[in-house]
Amino acid sequence: MSARYNISRFIAPLMALLLMMPVIARADSHAPTDTIRPDTIPVTPRPIAGWAGIGAGAAMLGGAALMRQAYPRNYHVGPVNSRSDRGTDYLQYAPLAAPWILKAAGVPTRSGWGRMAVSQGAAIAIMAGSVKAMKESIHSVRPDGSDDKSFPSGHTAWAFMGATMMARELGEVSPWYAVGAYAFATGVAVERAVDRHHYPTDVVAGAGIGILSANLGYLIGDLIFGRNGLELRGEDLRLNSNFSYLSLETGLSLPLGPIKAGDTRIQRLPALSASLRGGWAISEHWGLGLELGLLSTPLITDVHHDRTYVKSLSSLSAIIAPYYICSLSNRVSFTAEAAAGYRHNLPLNLDDSSIESGTSSPVGRMSVGCVLRLSPHFSARASVGYEMSRYRFTVKPSTAYHIPAPASTHGLSSALLVSLSSRYEF
């Protein structure tokens, strides 16, 4: 049984636990629930949150489409050596259903029943239409070769659309609802990439479509119900002086340059990164972060322009990241960090053991970013960065991957990073 399958079989129960996390943490509610009618929350409109979501979703979709150009246009699909985990066929809808279930159970939400139905109905129509149109027109073959509907990921679009809806409806009750929902959606995205249904760019594009569609749907709901969300209210936020946080980060890593072992070139395609981070404020501007992450890097062998898709190399990492943060306003902050840590590669476990990777590598990283506060305790961060690590590959003769002779190689590797995270700030 492959390491890939060992990871994916545990993702479903972990995601279920993440979705329940907000219910456990509801003590953080901003408003006393005994003063709020159960059918609606009298919140001050925060239009900046909707436009920020539209911008983030569009940026994720555009970035994924751009990075997809790094993929070779023609290649074979290598053999599949294990059964797929299809749990996300059902779990993709969980974030979408959660606000309705919680509302029926008496948890207050931002919208009444009719308003929520219109906003979310419009979002579903936009998302479903966009995903179907792109799948039918782009014709991208899946990593497992099953069909040509890989780009974008519909499962990820459903999950991130539902997570954004949950954040819009329940984020004012407690930011843990938003953090838990996005953690769950990220789990769906990781499963789709690790289980060989999609490339990393597919799931990032799906996430962008989901976020974009949900915010457009709520903008339509605001227009119909008289709150068009264009008034810049919600200025009750005070200057943030506590920069401790817990965040979930999703992004793409773009490896720079191929690796050559003898006559075999190993091409690393844009990789999906997902990480859980905690940050502790040390002073007014400085803090120390700890990151536990997963990196899924698709590999292609290229022997005299005969390309074959291998599978994704999954890696686990632990990184320490001192960071600097400067508040530019009540809502916007600038961040920078220099990080170092350790990455462990999981075995590829190919049927013929023709390609093996080194087991570990030190990692160094530098990044800059912008934090946008959406409520007193919930914010989003977008960042770009540069990373360096070491690689080691050994190849053996293989008919499946057209490798003619044994060889090995090692050296330094670099990558460009782009990421988006949801943060709970203490």
Image (cartoon, rainbow, N blue to C red):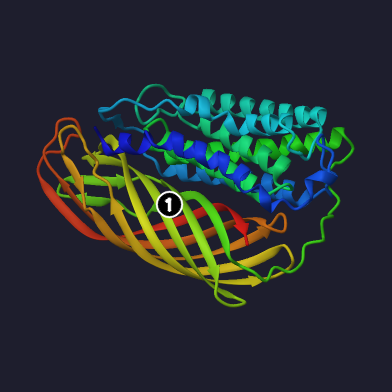
**At 12% across and 41% down in the image, what residue appears?**
396
Task: Give whichever of 422, 62 is nearer the camera.
Answer: 422
Give percent across and percent down for residue 349.
Answer: 22, 38
Give percent across and percent down for residue 253.
Answer: 43, 51
Q: Quadrant of residue 220?
A: top right
Total count of labels: 1
Give percent across and percent down for residue 204.
Answer: 51, 41
Q: Amino acid at mark 1?
A: Ser
Q: Quadrant of residue 109?
A: top right
Q: Quadrant of residue 212?
A: top right
Q: Is residue 331 left or right of residue 204?
A: right
**Placement of the C terminus among the 4 image quadrants:** bottom right
Give percent across and percent down for residue 149.
Answer: 47, 25
Task: Give whichever of 25, 180 is nearer the camera.
Answer: 25
Dot 1 falls on a residue whose secondary structure is strand
Q: Mark 1 sits on what residue?
A: 253
**Placement of the N terminus among the 4 image quadrants:** top left
**At 55% across and 57% down in the image, what residue appears?**
246
Task: Give whichever of 234, 424 is nearer the camera.
Answer: 424
Q: Is residue 269 left or right of residue 329?
A: left
**At 53% across and 51% down in the image, what residue appears?**
248
Task: Give whichever of 220, 88 is nearer the camera.
Answer: 88
Q: Is residue 252 left or right of residue 219?
A: left
**At 41% across and 46% down in the image, what residue appears?**
270
Compared with 115, 256 (above or below) is below
